[in-house]
Image (cartoon, helix red, strand yellow):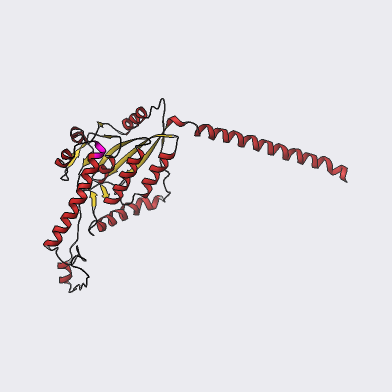
Amino acid sequence: MLKKDNPITLVLVVLGVAILFFGTVMAIVLSFSNLTTSLSFGNKIGVVPIYGLIKNADTITEQLIAFRKDRRIKAIILRINSPGGGVVPSQEIYIETRRTIQKKKVIASLGSLAASGGYYIASAADKIIANPGTLTGSIGVIMEFIRVEELLNKIGIEMQVIKSGEFKDIGSPNRKLTEKERELLKSLLEDIQNQFVTAVAKGRNMPREKVLEISDGRIFSGREAKELGLVDSLGNFQDAVNLAKRMANIKGEVKLVYPERKRRSFLWDLLFRNLIDSITDRIDRHYGILEYRWNGEFDMSN
């Protein structure tokens, strides 16, 4: 019995060894292939999209840090199409961009719109490229409140508020602001505005007085912004890629590396995402949130 089974056993052993050998060789080949790719240090540029309202900085700052630490990424492009947004998220991205330019070149590429907080972030980059028709600038801060006092009176609803201090319910929707409250908020906005002016002056290496002259919230075309020194050159995204290549001394073809996008269902994107984003934006902007945001209409589909 053993003699009859031995040839079969031998065949199985040989077959197993062959499979193991083949698998090992393939693993080595694949590993070498991946290693070769990872050793291609000089042909990668990271692209960080900043689209729509800036409400949270976490995803963008995490990507900046990841690209900064990745030795394969030689330069970074901030692709901005945003009306701005929250003061603090804009500042957090600005700060992380300033840290990044100490390690790698960062170019801001402005799309259709890069206003207020969108421009605030761009000003932290080494260079800014805008299209001639880009809407940018809008250096300023805004705070909005909604008032429903008359509506409540009409439907017979009265609000009773008990507060620990005079200004505890400042911005309440059921009453007008007092003059003292207006002065207090005006002082607050002036401080936040000065922070904006200081950031732009530092990022763009411009005299503070020159930035102050155009920090009344007005918006500029890309061509006007270049004349004012807010933008370095005019061009599209590909021009930004070419500039990044030159600044990072990249020769030949370049690979653009984008952050991995979270998967969402097509139906959700088509029917609900833009609608919900628009509704939450309309609600948020009436609750006294300090924003570096242009107040015009904008397209968040990018």
- Identify the residue at image location x=23%, y=41%: 200
Left or right: residue 123 versus residue 66 is left
Q: Where is residue 61 in the image (x, y as percent from the top left)?
A: 37, 46
- Relative to residue 132, is residue 251 depicted above or below? above
- Identify the residue at image location x=28%, y=39%: 111
Task: Count the labels in the image.
Answer: 0
Farthest residue, direction top: 252
Of residues 268 and 169, which is closer to you in this image?
169
Left or right: residue 181 versus residue 260 is left
Of residues 186 and 282, which is closer to you in this image?
186
- Relative to residue 264, is residue 44 depicted above or below? above
- Identify the residue at image location x=24%, y=37%: 204
Left or right: residue 134 versus residue 72 is left
Residue 302 visible to the viewer:
no
Quarter of the C terminus within the rendering: top left
* Magenta extent: 202-206
Quadrant housing residue 119: top left
Quadrant housing residue 74: top left
Q: Position of residue 280 (x, y in %)?
A: 29, 57
Of residues 301 and 72, which is closer to you in this image?
72
Q: Is the magenta stretch mostly helix, strand or loop?
A: helix
Residue 65 visible to the viewer:
yes
Q: Where is residue 238 in the image (x, y as percent from the top left)?
A: 33, 31
Q: Position of residue 181 (x, y in %)?
A: 15, 61
- Find out whether residue 144 is within the magenta segment: no
